[in-house]
Image: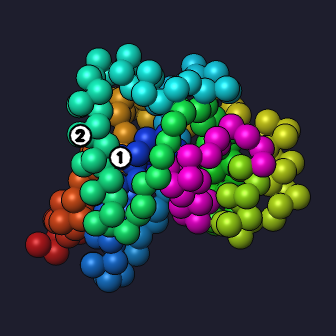
Amino acid sequence: MKIDFVSDVACPWCVVGLYSLEQALARIGGQWPIELHFQPFELNPDMAREGEDAFEHLSRKYGASPEQLAQGRRTLVERGAALGFAFGERRRVWNTFDAHRLMHWAGLQGRARELKHALLRSYHGRGENPAESAVLLRCAQEAGLDQAAAREVIESGRYEQEVRQSEAHFQQLGIQAVPSVIIDDRHLVQGGQPVEVFEQALRRLAGAV
């Protein structure tokens, strides 16, 4: 079973979606071979490297009141805690393109999942800037990737074309929101769904329900 997890480091609900999906995979206990691929999506592709105040950005983008944003945040923190992820303060929203380039390289090294977790902890747990080279290098180290090679990828701009092509591919498929989980290139589960929803979908599509 092939699973494409289309997401952005900047997306907090992608944390919920990934942790739910992984727990669903643990529940089915390796009954079927799984190929998990991490695919790029940018919520804010035009975001400047210096980023923007998170409250101002979310208020403008979604037209939400302070009360609505606070309630949404409480819901997110509760969902994260139930899955084992501790959301911290995230005061700014930053550009994530370099993180996607590093993710592409990590996938070639077989360490994409480890780097994805490191990036999510950095951004959503500690409020760090994924556009900073030092932050990306620490995440690469956490993921067990070679530091010299990671630095070369970050500083050289490698894999820009590959990431752009992947982003365009999934946009052409109609993906406009994340997380989007595409199973075997034809079945779509969207959003930060509960573990049970992912488990049921996986079992159904594998013909085990």
Disc 2 designates what residue? 71
Q: Residue at x 27, y 23 (%)?
A: 64
Residue 10: image location, x then y, percent: 49, 40
Residue 185 in sight from this viewpoint: no
Q: Relative to 206, say whether 15 is above or below.
A: above
Residue 164: image location, x then y, percent: 61, 31
Count neighbours of disc 1 (C-alpha within 10 A) and say few if under 14, some if 14 to 19, many if 20 or more.
Answer: many
Q: Is residue 35 left or right of residue 134?
A: left
Residue 25: image location, x then y, percent: 33, 72
Q: Relative to 106, say whether 179 is above or below.
A: above
Disc 1 designates what residue? 13
Q: Is residue 172 magenta?
A: no
Q: Earlier in the sequence, mark 2 or mark 1?
A: 1
Q: Amino acid at mark 1?
A: Trp
Count neighbours of disc 2 (C-alpha within 10 A) and say few if under 14, some if 14 to 19, many if 20 or more.
Answer: few
State which region is magenta. 112-134
Which of the 4 image quadrants contains residue 146? bottom right
Label 1 sits on a secondary structure element that is helix
Q: Relative to 8, say whether 124 is above or below.
A: below
Question: Is mark 2 in CB contact (under 8 Å) with mark 1?
Answer: no
Q: Amino acid at mark 2?
A: Gln
Q: Residue at x 33, y 63 (%)?
A: 81
Q: Is residue 114 magenta?
A: yes
Which of the 4 image quadrants contains residue 202? bottom left
Q: Quadrant of the N terminus?
A: bottom left
Magenta segment's dominant SS is helix
Q: Is residue 176 left or right of residue 198?
A: right
